Amino acid sequence: MSYPKFVNPQDLDRFRQQAVKAEKSFRARVLICATGCRSKGALDICEAFHTELASRKLDKEISVVAAGCHGQCSRAPAVVIEPLDFLYGGVIPEDVAEIIETTLLKGKPVERLCDRADGKLAPTMKEAPFYRRQRREVLAHCGRVDPKKIEDAIARGCYAAAAKALSMTPEQVIDEVREAGIRGRGGAGFPTGVKWGFCRKATGSPKYLICNADEGDPGAFMDRALLEGVPHQVLEGMIIAAYAIGAAHGFVYVRAEYPIAVEHVEIAIRQARACGLLGRNILGSGFDFDLEVRMGAGAFVCGEETALIASLEGKRGMPRARPPFPANQGYLNQPTTINNVETLANVPLILEKGRDWYKALGTPGNTGTKIFALAGKVNNTGLVEVPIGTTLRQIIYDIGGGIAKDRPFKAAQTGGPSGGCIPAKFLDLPIDYDSLKKIGAIMGSGGLIVMDENTCMVDMARFFMDFVQQESCGKCVPCRVGTRHMLDILTRICAGDGQDGDIERLESLGHEIKAAALCGLGQTAPNPVLTTIQYFRDEYESHINLKKCPAKECRGLFRYRIDEKLCKACGRCLKTCPAEAIKGEKKVPHVIDQQRCTLCGSCFEQCKFDAVLRE
């Protein structure tokens, strides 16, 4: 499709009106998550809707949109029907005819595909428990627009905030962002307006803007969802940021493991450039700015600013000592500002609705909303957006629907491998940058992994330390050698070979690494270990002194046994055992040969009578 070139804000507004009119020509829209849900057949669902609607000659009045993530991944594939706002989960192509007949033609919900709240049907997103307690501001249009069509974004006001910013002075834009109080959503929480001000005042030209989309925390996908679902919102934030700092060129640094995000951002850049929203003299303002996508190889350390810059320059991704800071000496030794995806996606909201509106969200010193990737042992997993200061209890129980199988909550890991484990006594702690720091954790980019009573906290610490150790660039000794020693100790403890003094050695190493490591990765690497020792020391002591894993997760510290009173001799465990470690005859309780047992757990999983015990 060819797009008109906007030479002034009036052209943009006229195009917006045309886009709104074109959208209203359809009496209904079918919004299918075709990004994260793609792995579960979302594209087949799109095709089924196109085919069925065409066969009924409804394709001219009902629009099918391959949209971004709706948020509730536990109900994937997800479909939203506008304007009824019905949300359907677990949809398959065979459901399409019924959805068209029942919903699009009769206006009624397909009940079996709907969520429920308090035992009652909750067909709409506003009624569904997962959504009704969220404050979806940054994610407002994610899942509601076609990310490959700029007209969809403009119809919802995209680029209007950029036009407004270009009518202000750069200093006024920086003041607005600074007064709004937004802190960087990439993990450190540094005030965004202050960072922009440093770069604006820095001497040197040209200046550069970098969007950090190198999202490396295990289980985190907030930035990916924004790039896949609302790429133009991120580009708009970049235009505003570039104008504020005086940059004429920018980069979106994204990991190659995000192919859909890369595709959608590249399409968005081409469309914005064709419309005159990127390039020379944007909207007749005299401001020039263009950008390009650069793909990284997925090194976790490249989430650190100076390592990212090194990678962008074609060097090995390794951090350097600071100062000088990137604001003064960054990409190609020129003044550079780096903001992460979510930070930039917030910026248009601040310019559009004002600093006072933004400050009213969140808490003093921690304004706005935060997107979390809710995962782990929780019923409703997915992307959650709430005002900063919302408690863990509200996120896990009110939005997440509580712990799977009604098990007790044990801990939550925030901030990924650099974060800390938060125990149940802090369930009512408001989550913000400062409160988490006080208890040894960090906000991070927004990963939130929920753990229940069956999670071994020692093994959890070992898992994250293994990740960090593998991802260490190796430049500084504290991180390269120190994390290796910590991992070796944790591995021994989980194997049942823990020794007296191991806990103290872990604490000592952890504090030394935090104090001496070169970059943020090394400085925060010990957090999962130190917080699990602080709040779950008894589990470490049990592993070391009693040679027992309370959660029965660490191999070598538990065994499987068949309770002869519960065993029905059905033979399921015997047939599924890959080591042939289970013996028994028909109508005779079976027995596990402990010498042959490999602790694979297949018998435990297959037994229908709970006769296989893990002890």
Image: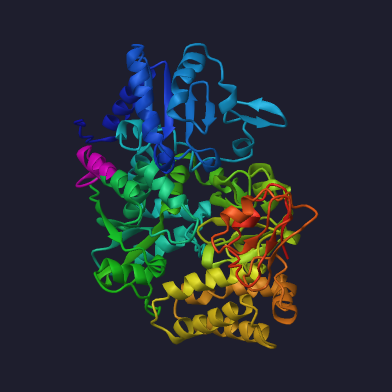
Which of the image's four quarters has the C terminus?
Answer: bottom right
Residue 550 picture location, percent across and down: 73, 68
- 32 vs 126, nearest the viewer: 32
- In this rendering, position of residue 443 left or right of residue 347: right
- In this rendering, position of residue 261 left or right of residue 462: left
Queried whether the magenta region covers residue 278, the answer comes back as yes
Q: Which residues are magenta?
A: 267-284
The vertical placement of 65 against 272, above or below, is: above
The vertical placement of 200 against 466, above or below, is: above
| Identity of the residue drawn at 55% across and 81% down | 486
Q: How is the structure coloured here?
A: rainbow
Residue 307 picture location, percent across and down: 36, 71
| Identity of the residue drawn at 48% across and 70% down | 467
Q: How many marks?
A: 0
Which of the image's four quarters has the N terminus?
Answer: top left
Quarter-wise, where is residue 66 in the image?
top left
Queried whether the magenta region covers residue 72, the answer comes back as no
- Residue 497 visible in the displayed image: yes
The vertical placement of 445 against 503, above or below, is: above
The vertical placement of 325 against 342, above or below, is: below
